[in-house]
Image: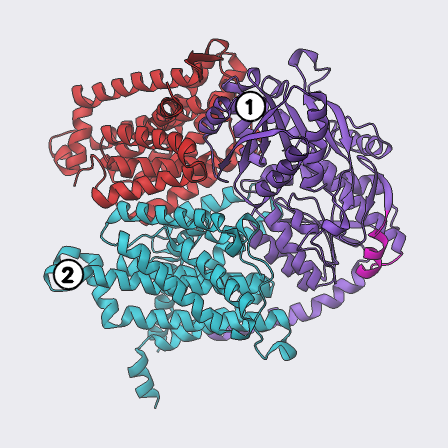
Chain colours: A purple, B cyan, C red
Amino acid sequence: MDRRSLLAAAGSAAAGSLLAPNFAIAQSKAFNYYSVNAFSGNFAVSGKFSDLGVRAAIKGFGNGLGRPIDYKKLDSEGNPAIAVRKVQQVIEQEKARFFGGAALSSEALAIMKEVDKAKGVYITYVGADEVTGKDCNRSTFRWTLPTYGAVNTVMRPLIQQNPKWEKVYTITGQYVFGEALLRNAKAVMQETRLEHVGNSYHSLAEKEYSGYLGNAMSSGADVLVILNFGANTLDLLRQAASFGLKQRMAVVVVWFSGLDTFQSLGADVTEGMYFGVQYWHTLDTPGNKEFLKVYRGEFSENPRFYSAADYQIATLMFDAVKRAGSDEPAAVIKALENHTYQGLTGEEQIRAFDHQCVKNYMLIRGKKKSAMKDADDFADILYSSRAVSTRGESECKMA
Amino acid sequence: MLETLRIRLGDSAGPFYLALIAFALLAPLVTGSVSTAGAVLVFAIAAAACNLMLGYAGLLSFAQGSFFGVGSYVVGITLKAHPGVGLGALAVSVIAGMLLALAIGALSIRQRGIYFVMITLAMAQLAFFASLALPGWTGGENGLLDIPRPALGLEASLGDSRSQYALAAMLFIASLAFLRRVVRSPFGRSLDAVRENELRAQTAGFDVQRLKLVAFCISGGLTALAGALYALQLRSAPLSNIDLMTSETILVMAILGGRRSLIGAAFGALAMTLMAEQLSQLWPRWQMIVGFVLIATVLFAPNGLGGLWAQLRSSRAAAAKEAA
Amino acid sequence: MNLYVFQALNGLGVGMIYFLLSVGLSIIFGLLGFVNFAHGALFLVGAYAAMFTAEQTGSFALGLAASFAVVALVGVVAERLVLRRTYKMPHEAQILVTVGLTFILTETIVLFFGPQPRQVSMPDMLNGVLMLGPYPIPKYRIFIFVTCAVIGAALWLLFERTLFGARVRAGNESAEMLSLLGVKVTRVYALTFALGTGLAGLAGGLAAPLRGADPSMGMEAIVIAFVVVVLGGIGSFSGPLIGGLIIGVTQSMMTAIWPEGARLTIFLVMAAILLVMPKGLFGRA
């Protein structure tokens, strides 16, 4: 192709793209919801289950908006740079304003800035407290209970139930999230007068935990508290079980994904351990019952955390748009603030000053394989609470 | 005047610069958006800088990701502390990249072949872990956020995202033009000599280690520039910019494009980005297709996309000669 | 017995897996000059092959056999179809091809097994711990050490005492000489490739009960494999053995001495050794 025809082709392409927008406006008045997650790459688990959750939400919401819901997936590949780029692209090309999800905290933190710049609405469920803490902004809402609530919900009742516990050993991920968990754990241990006999930090990329477990075993602690997330937790627990750690001390995992991680480990590993979860499928609440009806009806299986979380945030979004009676992000934001509703974990409320959802966090205990009523009955719920820190303690300063 | 221009720039300079400009202008159309095209230009710069090492110095470096990441972090830290510096922050990033290359190079440049690859990999891992260990500077696993874009004076007429793209386009053209000058200069010729036969070059009197080190520094500086540009576009510097995947991606783009072809590097960046963009919308297992494409390229287009482009141009020139 | 000895013993088990993973890469690189970036993906395929076979047949031993056989087969097929054509090409072409192969292998596994990490169970008799003083050593880690030691001895015999081994070592020095002597070089290459890749698969099968099977195993394995091979010296046999053990033990001990830096230490040790011995511990020029 010579230069002339190349220029001609370019010209017609440009002309074509100028014409396209008019066509698009006349076409659809569907509600566009953009779900960002990792559908490929190392974190593809997240995307796979997230997709099921959004689809359940759309099914469950039915025709509540009076028009079709157009659900678009943005594959971040587990890479925050790609997530931001794709969000920027749809904001510019498709005037996208309503976003949900994220596989990683780093993705969510970067995306929320872009959505805020575009004055959109973004609901997420990642672990970083900064989302509704020092990085909070008007566009962003967070469903998951922060580390303060996770630590307190898990540790306090256990400490109360086990007055013989005196010494605690912690294994902490050496990253911002791990530090947040440790900070809260130390506060609890101080208040309950437990002796914190030692802490081992491990790096984000760690795979070999025998040393840390050795430290824990030689510390003479009664209980091992695990303060990390994701693959770190899985590898650590697997190795802890192989070392017979459970026979020597109680094991408490403050931040655990839930059904998918139970399935990855198996009941032999998780039996007798304590876990803190944002969601568990046996929750007996009206919100969860409704969700299970739709989800089990569609997919004939029990939902995992990502599916539940994506279902909840998508439903919140659709519902807010409906209540606001408009597609204006400012109106939708207003509709979300101070909203109280029947969520998956019971009655939940979205705080206005930091857009943090106040919901229940659950303490569960791993069951023996022989005691499991079905293939997914890995744990019993022992306790739940909605502990959150006060406004005074918050770092959020929203414009 | 045209004659002197041609003598100064070299015979094929005209078409090269035209190709760069055309690439920068057409990328948004081909990729469908200015954001994606911006990323293509960023990685084109990084891949071209990698070509300097790979195709000219003959060194396969796994540390390119560290320069990229350091560039992102430095531009972010600079602009957040002193927003008034504006585009000068880019210069700071380039210097940071060159200094890092100097440091890594001092330790690794004596190694050859696979040993050089592995030392650079070790350095890259060091940079990664250092970034994780200094959350006060880098934001740790959360990344460095809220990086302010310097005002370019074009925002009113073009809009925010297009003026960012204009900056990317200018830097892309300037970087590749600069690289072309470098590889065609006496320095570039000496690099060729070193790459072809290091022992002979040494006995001929070339300071082999110094030549390689200088190439490494140029490559590091430009890769850092790419990283800085990316950080400006994203308004953030995530940890992923400095991890091994980024090094691997840059290398793959450079090799795909053809290790000696600068315009090939741009095509390599375009191909990989487009594939990721388009295929990920169709199938979550899209990386499998990329795998087949990479293998096919090596088997059927051993000189990469740049080689295909050169073949296209020479066959057109031959046809033109015949027609004349 | 104190904590550091305990860590060191744990490190030996891990180190032996690193050895098994890396020795194939070393041999292939030494003999063919071929940079196999797909080596980590082979580890991954081995783990899943073992898991699948063990689940279907109920036999852990069959699972291990499958992890070797399946991956050796994959290696041979890949070599014959694609990789053979790149031997004469520069290293970066080989890297591109094997990166492509990695994508294909990894995504195929995810296509069949899904992206969720999977637990791989070990046979009951290997479950549990052996007490050494106050420290529990998992029986499985001892099993790994013993198995890898046996395989290592067998490999040594193969390379030092058999005709095939002699040919491989000769080919290491000069492929040209080998063909001039009338040996069918492509045959030696193919067998070496099968052996090298099969060993990586077996390493995956052995490691699976220890760390589960998940799609990110490949990336992690390739980095370790290259570190161990380079540190030990390319083309050698003792190199990956000593290198693997050094890395394994150092990593384990660091988790007691400098926990946050344990992972990083692997690279520091490699860099330090290369600075002093640029060809690695047992590398040939």
> Which residue occupies 48% across, 48% down?
B133
Q: Amino acid at mark 2?
A: Ala
Identify the residue under disc 2.
B201
The image shows a total of numbered marks equal to 2
Front position in the image: A93 or B283: A93
> Which residue occupies 57% across, 59% down?
B236
Which image quarter holds the C terminus of chain C? top left
Identify the residue under disc 1.
A221
Q: Which residues are magenta?
A: A325-339
> Does A41 lie within the magenta span?
no
Label 1 residue SS = loop
Residue B262, by quadrant, is bottom left
> Does A337 lie within the magenta span?
yes
Front position in the image: A3 or B40: B40
> Which residue occupies 35% across, 19% down?
C145
Which image quarter holds the N terminus of chain C? top left
Left or right, C16 with reference to A322: left
- Tell me where residue B76 appears, x and y as whole percent: 52, 63
Q: Amino acid at mark 1?
A: Ala
- Tell me where residue B109 appears, x and y as whole percent: 25, 54
Image: B274 above or below C173: below
Query: Pointer 2 indicates a residue of which chain?
Result: B
Q: Is residue B284 visible?
A: no
Image: C28 above or below B128: above
- Tell me where residue C114 appears, x and y as whole percent: 58, 32
